[in-house]
Image (spheres, rainbow, N blue to C red):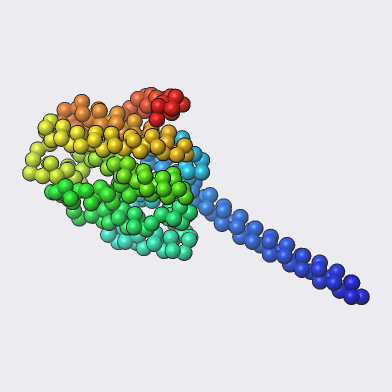
Amino acid sequence: MRDTRRSIMKRFFNESVELLRTRNFIHESSREKFNQVCFKISELVTRKYSTSFYTASLLYNKKVRKHIFSIYGFVRFADEIVDSFHSYDKEKLLSDFERDCIEAIQIGISLNPILHSFQETMRKFNIPYDYVDAFLNSMRLDLNKTTYSSKAEIKDYIYGSAEVVGLICLKVFCGKNEKLFNELKDYAIKLGSAFQKVNFLRDIKNDTKNLGRIYFPELVNKKFDEETKRIIIEDIENDFAEALKGIKRLPYNSKLAVYIAYLYYMDLLKKIQKSPAEEILSRRIRVNDFKKLILILRAIIDYKLKRI
């Protein structure tokens, strides 16, 4: 009789444990499915908004790639708020976006797919919220501030709008290797700065004529001419020269994709350098798709031959 009771109790215990395991599995499976959907939406945002960045991102290691998409999705939506949604209350949209982002990171979930995938990345790689705060502060400046009349002002803006994005990505690339992160940090800052300044030059027509913004202090009370263009480009080239030293030391999971972005922006800068100042003010300078393909092939060859 005692053995029968023991047998029943043992079976009841085992079945209860199995039931709990099953419920936990269902819960985890549902969460994982939700995560996958959110990361896929971030990937879709990347593909729709920037085919060049999306194509280069496919060369990231698979485990890194989805997190780069999540960072791009977050940055892109914040940028869209301040640059595109002119018929809406941008300040409220940005404040709500920031509030929802903070809450998502704090509790570990959001029903906004872009914010959910982004908080997954933030929490997984233990990324300081200070970087996000600096980024959103720069986005907020774009709501009202139109002219950057000093080097200090534009330096602060670029730190928030671009350099911290590079640092967030670097945290993903380096994973738990804090030593490597600290060694490459300054190079990532230089690369982010160079990318942003090239963007300023490329978009100078839209920024000045449509948005009324002047990002280069050199252009305050002065016309954009060949001399100011030369000064600005020389500064960008110095940033790129430093940044390349850091790209060569990146982990295998990210080196090729970042190098492709570097080559693309360098080529764009060369096109801008060769274009007359008047032309830059009248149309957006681009790198055509064929040249982008050539740059990707060059990057792959350099990578395979260990030139980087």
Q: Quadrant of residue 12?
A: bottom right
Image coordinates of residue 240 in percent, x first then y, are 28, 35
Image: 274 above or below 100 = above
Residue positioned most to the left: 221
Which residue, as the protein is rendered here, is positioned at the far bottom?
Answer: 1
Identify the image quadrant of the N terminus: bottom right
Classify residue 297 as left or right of residue 138. Answer: right
Q: Quadrant of residue 290?
A: top left
Q: Nearer the viewer, residue 273 or 289?
A: 273
Q: Is residue 195 left or right of residue 256?
A: left
How many dots with numbers?
A: 0
The residue under the point 31% across, 61% down is: 95
Residue 212 image offset from top left, x and y in percent = 17, 47
Of 153 and 208, which appears nearest the observer?
153
Q: Is residue 213 visible?
A: no
Q: Residue at x 24, y 40 (%)?
A: 197
Image location (x, y in percent) of residue 168? 38, 49
For the question of whether residue 190 can be seen, the reply is yes
Residue at image position (40%, 30%) is 308
Is residue 204 rendered to the left or right of residue 104? Answer: left
Foreground residue, 183 or 32? 183
In the image, is residue 39 above or below residue 242? below
Q: Position of residue 139 (x, y in %)?
A: 28, 53
Q: Would residue 296 appear left or right of 35 to someone viewing this image? A: left
Residue positioned 34% across, 54% down in the render: 131
